[in-house]
Image (tube, helix red, strand yellow):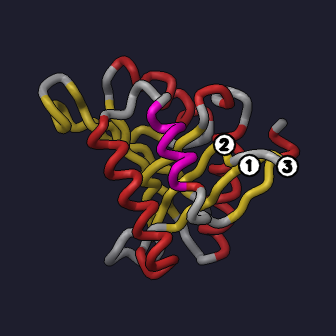
């Protein structure tokens, strides 16, 4: 399945498709879904000028199955943040997310990017997310206790691209 994935830019019809996918991802709160959809709107309205780049994965002749949203961190020479990675729950664990990360990393390298950061929750429901980043070469560099709320630590991962 992964070998037949195509990557493309975000298109207007994608917003409703991804809103539906996000509703099926139990880790996301309503507030998080709203935030992710706001970034989609910004990109659709302003393109790359929004500061948010999107790569959308889809199988041939199929609806989009996921995306990664990322951007250059202001005031850095070549560091990037991953803001969201969203994969249809039926497609998780089959390599789509890894393929999205690889293509995103290649795009960042083309722009002379040197580091990619990603933040996630330390809650138990995010263990698979944590494992995903570790499996893909991201190293845990910080844990901020009780960041999001009591007993919800912020985990910060980084991957050096050089």
Q: Tell me the CA gap for discs 1 and 3.
A: 6 Å
Q: Which residues are magenta?
A: 15-23
Kindly check if marks 2 and 1 are in contact, taking CB atoms under 8 A apart as contact: yes
Q: Tell me the CA gap for discs 2 and 1.
A: 5 Å
* Residue 17 included in the magenta stretch of the image: yes
Q: To which residue does mark 2 refer? A: 65
Q: Residue at x 59, y 50 (%)?
A: 67
Which of the two labelled residues, at mark 2 and mark 3, occupies the earlier sequence position?
A: 3
Which of the two labelled residues, at mark 2 and mark 1, occupies the earlier sequence position?
A: 1
Q: Is residue 111 left or right of residue 96?
A: left
Q: To which residue does mark 3 refer? A: 60
> Vertical placement of 49 versus 128: above or below?
below
Most foreground residue, 153 or 91? 91
Secondary structure beneath disc 3? loop
Q: Tell me the CA gap for discs 2 and 3.
A: 11 Å
The main secondary structure of the magenta stretch is helix
Q: Residue at x 65, y 26 (%)?
A: 90
Q: Is residue 111 left or right of residue 7?
A: left
> Vertical placement of 35 versus 2: above or below?
below
Q: Residue at x 42, y 73 (%)?
A: 51
Q: To which residue does mark 1 refer? A: 58
Q: Quadrant of residue 33?
A: top left
The single residue placed furthest to the top in the displayed view is: 124
Q: Quadrant of residue 1?
A: top right
Residue 69: horizontal and vertical position, in percent? 50, 57
* Residue 95 included in the magenta stretch of the image: no
């Amino acid at each position: 399945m992964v070998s037949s994935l195509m990557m493309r830019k975000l298109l207007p019809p994608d917003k409703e498709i991804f809103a539906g996918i996000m509703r099926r991802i139990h880790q996301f709160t309503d507030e998080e879904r709203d935030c992710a959809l706001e970034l989609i709107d910004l990109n659709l309205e302003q393109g790359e000028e929004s500061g948010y780049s999107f790569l959308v994965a889809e199988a041939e002749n199929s609806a989009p199955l996921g995306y990664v949203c990322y951007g250059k961190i202001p005031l850095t020479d070549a560091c990037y943040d991953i803001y969201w990675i969203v994969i249809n729950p039926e497609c998780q664990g089959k390599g789509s997310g890894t393929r999205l990360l690889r293509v995103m990393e290649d795009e960042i390298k083309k722009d002379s990017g040197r580091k990619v950061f990603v933040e996630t929750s330390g809650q138990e429901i995010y263990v698979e997310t944590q494992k995903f980043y570790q499996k893909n070469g991201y190293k845990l560099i910080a844990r901020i206790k009780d960041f999001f709320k009591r007993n919800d630590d912020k985990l910060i991962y980084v991957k050096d691209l050089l």
